[in-house]
Amino acid sequence: MNAEVVIVGAGPAGTAAAIHLGQLGISNVVLVDRLDFPRDKTCGSGVSPNGIATLEQLGVWPDVERHAYPIHGLRVVTAGGREIYVSGGDSNSAVICQRRVLDQILLERAKALGVEFVPNFVARELLGEAGRISGVVARDAREIRARYTIVADGAHSKFVVERGPKRLIHAIMGWWDDVPFRANHVEMVFDKDVLPYYGWLFPEGERRVNIGICYGDDGHAKNARSLFSAFLAKHYESRLAGAHQVGDWKGHPISWSYKIDQLWSPGRLVIGEAGRMTHPATAEGIYQGMRSGILAAEAIAAIAHGAPEGEAFEQFQRNCRRTFRRSFLAGALIKRAVASPVPDWLVASERLFKRFATKLAS
C-alpha cells in the first residue's frame, strides 16, 4: 500500500492528526493500529478544558459530550489529611469519557474525512530509504510506504527518534459500581506513599467510578498491587464496602519528559506519549496527544503549500515546545509543592486553594 501519510497508532494523538489532515485537505492518509475498534484502553479518561477545546476544533465535541460525564468540581485530600471541595458552578470544567467511546468517536470522524483505517496491523519496524523514514512494515510483512510517517503508538513506542532512557510514571487502577461520591466531582488524594503523585477517583457515570494511583518507581522497588491495596484501605475502605468491583485492576506506564525535543527526522514526526508529551505532575496525556497531532498535521500541510520539510518539521517541534513547555515546567513546581506543607496551608483559604487547583488542572 502506498500513502501520502501513514500514522502508526489510533489513540487520540494519531486520530487527531488524521482528522486535522483531512480538515486541511491532505488526502491518501492511512491510519494503522495493532487492535480493531472499539477497544478498551486503561486510562483515567479525564478530558481537561484544553482537551474539550481541542475536541471542538476537531469537530467531535457534540458527539463526545453526549457520552461524557460532566465535571464541575474537585475534592482534594492533602498529604497532611486536610480535605477541601472546590466547585466551579454548572459549567463543564472537564469531562470523563471512557477511552473505548472517545477513541471510537475520533476514529469515525477521521474515516468520515477519507482516512483509511487498517486494524490488526502490528507494526514491526519503520521502512527507511536514503536516510529518511518511508513507511512501516507489520509483523505479517504487510508494508505501507508513505511520504510521511507519524509515530503515535504511545509509551512503549520503538519507532521514536533516539532520546535515551525513558522517565516513567507508573499507574494502577480499577473500576467499581455504587461507590458513594459527590456528583460531578473528581477526587485527587495526595497520599504520602505516592507523592509527588496522587491517587484519584473519577466518576464515569451515575454509578461507575474508576479509582487509581500514579507513582514513581525509578528503582523498581515497589509492588503496584500492594501499594494500591494500602491506598484503598486507607482512603476508600468504607466507601467500597457496599460497592461491586468491575473486572480486575490494570496497570500502565506513562512516559514523560520536561524536555520537548527530537520529535522529528527526515520523513518522520513523533507525537503524543510516544514523544513523551504528557504532563509531568498530573500524567494527563489526552489533550497533549491531540494537540501535538494537530500540530503535526499542520506541518505536513505547510510542506504541501511549499515549505521545505526540514523547516516545517522544525517549526512543528517549536510549536510543541511553545504549547507545552510552560505547563510542563510548572509541573516540576507543582510536584515540589504537593510534597510540602504548602497544600495544607492553602486549604485554610479556599480562594488561594482554588487558584492552586486551577493551575494544577492547566
Image (spheres, rainbow, N blue to C red):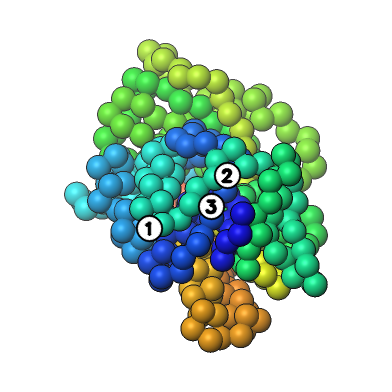
Depth check, front residue: 223 or 9: 9
Instruction: Determine which of the numbered discs, if any, sits on residue 113 in the image.
Output: 1
Which amino acid type corresponds to the residue marked 3 in the rendered image? Leu
Q: Residue visible at 72% across and 65% down?
A: 133
**Element under label 3?**
strand
Q: Quadrant of the N terminus?
A: bottom right
Instruction: Determine which of the numbered discs, if any, sits on residue 294 in the image.
Output: none
Residue 167 in picture, x, y percent from top left: 71, 53
The residue wearing badge 2 is 33
The residue wearing badge 3 is 31
- Using a 10 Å C-alpha cutoff, classify the residue at mark 2 as few (fewer than 14 neighbours), some (14 to 19) or many (20 or more): many
Depth check, front residue: 355 or 206: 206
Residue 358 in picture, x, y percent from top left: 38, 59
Mark nearer the N terminus (2 vs 1): 2
Q: Residue visible at 80% across and 72% down?
A: 130
In this view, the residue farthest toward the front is 1
**Residue 145, picture quadrant:** bottom right
Q: Quadrant of the C terminus?
A: bottom left
Q: Residue visible at 41% across and 51% down?
A: 111
Which amino acid type corresponds to the residue marked 2 in the rendered image? Asp
Q: Is residue 103 visible?
A: yes
Q: Residue visible at 63% across and 68% down?
A: 147
**Residue 250, picture quadrant:** top right
Which amino acid type corresponds to the residue marked 1 in the rendered image? Leu
* Contact between labelled residues 3 and 2, with CB atoms less than 8 Å apart: yes
Depth check, front residue: 62 or 19: 19
